[in-house]
Amino acid sequence: MIASPFATHEVFNQTPPLGDMDLWNDDPALQGAVRAFGRADNELLTSLAAFGERWGTVEMAEFGRLANENPPKLRTYDPHGYRADRVEFHPAYHALMRASMAAGIHCSVWGPDGKLSKPGAFVARAARQMMSAEVEQGHQCPIVMTHAATGALLAEPTLLKEWLPKIRSREYDPAFQPAEMKASVTLGMGMTEKQGGSDVRANTTRAEPDGDAYRLTGHKWFFSAPMSDAFLVLAQAKGGLTCFLMPRFLPDGRVNALRLRRLKDKLGNHSNASSEVEFQAAYARRCGPEGEGIKTIIRMVALTRLDCVIGALGILRAALLQAIHHVRFRTAFQKKLVDQPLMRAVIADLALEREAALALGFRLAHAFDHPGEPDEETFARLITPAAKLYVCKMVPGFVYECLECMGGNGYVEENPMARLYREAPLNAIWEGSGNIMALDVLRGVSRESEAAERLLARLAKETESLPGARDAIVRVQKEFTSANREGHARRAAEALAQLATAAALAASAPPAIAEMYAARRLSGIAGRNYGDPLPDALADELMNRTLVQGL
C-alpha cells in the first residue's frame, strides 16, 4: 500500500466523540432534583429515561447542528407577487419541533380546563425542557411561548375554550393555513417596540374597536416566533394598555394584516426566527379587560421567565459535560487533565455551580406545581425574577470557563461549544434583563412585606444548619430595607437567590454539596472566578453527578 503523501504524523491524545448519550441516566443531579421536588413515580421515571435516551442520540445532536447552520428565511412575497410573509425552516428544525411537541413540552401542564393537568406536572415538564435545551435551544422559543400563552388565555374564557384544544395537541403541524384546519397550533408574542423596549407602557400601537373585535395599527420591534398561528400582543385601547390575541388568519380564511419586515440577524439562537413586524389594521381579539394588558400578559411572562431558568440549566449542563468529557481523556504533562490539581479544581467548582442552579430551578418549578398555596405562590412571585437574574446571568461566564477547559478545541465551530457560547447571553436578556429582574424582586418585597418576611423565615429554617446562612439572612433583610435599596437591588436579589439555592440543595443533593455551596456562596462576595479546590472525593462526586464516570 502506498502511503498518503499527507500522512505526516499519527493523530493521538484527542478526545473521542461523545457519541450516543443518555441525558437522564447519565445525570444523577437531574434525577435527584426530580425526586426531591416532583412526583417521581415509576411511570414518570420510565418516561424521562426514554426521553433522555432519545434526545441524547447523535441523530438529535445533528438536528441541532443543522438547524443552526441553516437558519430560517423570510419569504415576503410568493412567486406570483402576492404578499406572503412566511418563514421557511430547515427540515432539522421541524424534526426538533416534532419531537418536543410529541413529548408535550408545549402543553403537558395544562388540563382540558386550563388547570394543572396532574400533580408534579411543572417539574416533569422542566426535566424534559432542560434535556431538550441541552441539544438545541432555538426551537424552544415557540414551544415555550405556546406553553406560557395559556396562562394569559385564562383571563378570557372564550378564547381559552377556542384555542386550548389545539394547543394541547401533540401532533406538530407547521402548515400555513387557518387554525381550524390544523391538527395543532403554536403561539408567539409581541410586546416590545422601538421606542420603549422593556418599558411597554410606552407602546404606541393602537387598537380600534371593530364590532366584537379590534383592529391594531403599529409595530413590534421584537416579534417572537413569527410563523406561529396566533400572537399575544399589547396595544393601546381606549381603556389603556390592553392584551390582544392576533390570529395569523382572519375568520374568513384570508391572511391577517401582519407585515413581517425582516428577521433579526442575531448573535446566536440562529435556528429560531425573531422578527420585526408592522400591523396594518390587523384583526385581533381582546384577551382580558381593557387597561389590564400588563396584568394579563404577566401571567404569560411569569411562565416564560421560569422557562428562561430551565433553558439556562440545559446550556450549563451541555457545556459542562463537554468540558468534563474532554478533561477525562486529554493528557498534558504526563497526566490526564482531570488529575491536574488546578484543572480539577475548576471543573469541580463549575459542577458545584451547575448543581446549585439545577436545584434552584427545580425548586422553583415545584412552586408552580402548587397554585392556591399562599407560601408557594409567594415563592414563585419573588424567587422567579431572583432566579432568572442569578442563574441566567451566570451562563456566559460559565460557558466561557468550560470552553477554556478545552483550549483551542473548544473555540472552533466544529465543536458545539461555540454555539453554546453564542446562545449563553439570551436567557438573561429575554423577558427582562438583570435590572428589570432586580427591580421586580424589590417591588414584590415592598408590596408583600409580610409574605416576604414569611419567605425569609422559611429559608432561614431550611438553611439553619448551613454555614453562612444566618449572616446571609441578615444581609438580605438589610439590603431590602436600606435607604438606597434600589441601588442595591441586584445585590439583594442575587443574595435572595443564593439563599433559596442553598435551601434547595439541602433538599436535593448530598449534605456535603449543600454545605460546600453555602460555605462558598453565602459569604456575600459574588464569585466571578472558578477554581477554589475541593476535597478529591467531593470533586469526583460532583463531576459524576453531571456526567457519570466511564461514559
Image (cartoon, rainbow, N blue to C red):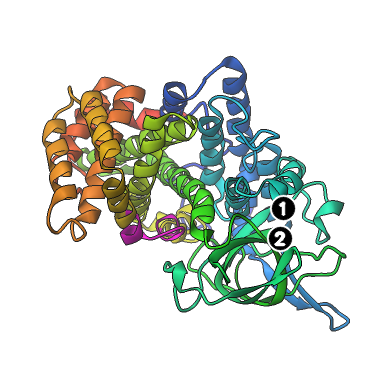
From this view, report whether residue 47 is shown above or below residue 495.
Answer: above
Say if the magenta span includes residue 247.
no
- Please give the name of the residue rendered at 37% of the width and 33% of the height, measured from the top-left corner: 359
Q: State the image coordinates of residue 301 (x, y, percent, origin top left).
A: 49, 52
Residue type at mark 1: give it: His
Left or right, 546 with reference to 155: left
Residues rendered magenta in the picture: 425-437
Give the secondary structure at mark 2. Answer: loop
C-alpha gap between disc 1 and disc 2: 7 Å
Q: Which residue is mark 1?
A: 94
From this view, report whether residue 514 is shown above or below residue 312.
Answer: above
Residue 90 shows which numbered tag? 2
From this view, report whether residue 103 is shown above or below residue 250.
Answer: above
Q: State the image coordinates of residue 112 (x, y, percent, origin top left).
A: 71, 34
Q: State the image coordinates of residue 84 (x, y, percent, origin top left).
A: 79, 74
Q: Main secondary structure of the magenta part?
A: helix
Q: State the image coordinates of residue 312 (x, y, percent, origin top left).
A: 44, 47
